[in-house]
Amino acid sequence: MRYADDIDTLEVAAFTSDIVRPRPARIAAYPKDVIQTCLATGAGLGNDEAPHIWILIMTRIERLTRRSFVFGTISAAAALAGCQTATTPAPLPQVARRPILPPDDAELKLRYAALEDGGHSIPAIPYQQIDPKYYRQRVNDPTGEKPGTVVVDTGNRFLYVVEPGGTAMRYGVGIGRDGFAWEGEGVVHWRQAWPRWKVPDEMIARSPGLARYSVENGGMDPGIKNPLGARALYIFQNGKDTLYRLHGSPEWQSIGKATSSGCVRLVNQDVIDLYTRVPYHARIVVHQRPLSGAAAV
């Protein structure tokens, strides 16, 4: 039988199956209640053929004494020897789920009321004349994307901002010709409140009358009649402009429809709300086919 005065010898013995135990003088240094607890396990102090479990018990106790840890944090190996009662792990915090409630008439009146913004007067939206499914509203997330992602469901005429907890804020949109021209993943590279409309050369080639609003001519001044409305978000992919835009529009009648021009348009009240939820460099995913899990109501 070999005796050990130091913790390292005990550790080696524990992993090499050597029969080693602490000297009696070392045992006496431990609190009486600890020794009694270990004796209760059947390990035994006086047996020259002491089980290896005794070695593990003493090793853990010595380590914890040396480091001034609380006895209750002894490892799972010591717990098997009876020196600790197993505890249930604390549950992980859950992300709060936002309530899903359809907006009532009072809320809709406030949501789509006339307002002043950036020195411009935005008229009220006659929301009663819009299909209710296109109202801005919180829904169960059908996209499966990470929170913070913007998802355009071109086929169903919806735009989603994915939220934590399995919900998404959904907006009704109108899809212009350019909105059908691109799909895939990108980022919101630039955002602008009350942007100037600078018509790209590709659009001027189709409609030469728009040349007065070209980049060279400085574009159209911001305002209610500007086709980009109160806000615009510009989508890039791999560092290049896709010419895909999320923007406001005074033409509330176009929501839920395919239109002859523009990209993805929202009523001005909704694009202002969207602008507050979507930061620079937010990820965006555009689908041309309808999302299978999207609710139609």
Image (spheres, helix red, strand yellow):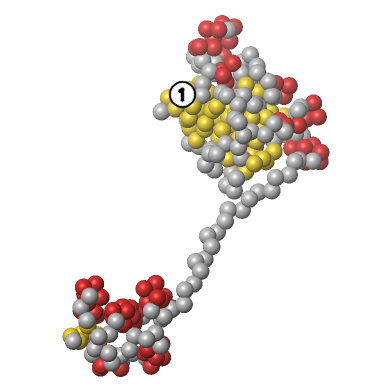
Q: Which residue is nearer to you in this view: 230 or 184? A: 184
Residue 97, percent from left and from top: 63, 50
Q: Is residue 37 above or below residue 214?
A: below
35 with respect to 4 (left or right)? right
Q: Residue at x 43, y 24 (%)?
A: 240
Quadrant location of the C terminus?
Answer: top right
Q: Residue at x 46, y 24 (%)?
A: 241
Q: Residue at x 61, y 40 (%)?
A: 141
Residue 76, percent from left and from top: 39, 72
Q: Which residue is nearer to you in this view: 61 or 54? A: 54
Mark 1 nearby-residue class (10 Å; few <14, some 14–19, many ≥20): some
Q: Residue at x 67, y 40 (%)?
A: 139
Q: Is residue 96 visible?
A: yes
13 with respect to 206 (left or right)? left
Q: Is residue 197 visible?
A: no
Instruction: Say which amino acid is labelled 1.
Output: Asp
Residue 36, percent from left and from top: 39, 91
Most extreme residue toward the front is 49
Quadrant location of the N terminus?
Answer: bottom left
Report the number of discs: 1
Q: Quadrant of residue 112?
A: top right
Q: Quadrant of residue 104?
A: top right
Q: Which residue is nearer to you in this view: 175 or 212? A: 175
Give the residue number, with chain letter if any, for mark 1.
241
288 with respect to 23 (left or right)? right
134 with respect to 189 (left or right)? right
Residue 16, percent from left and from top: 21, 73
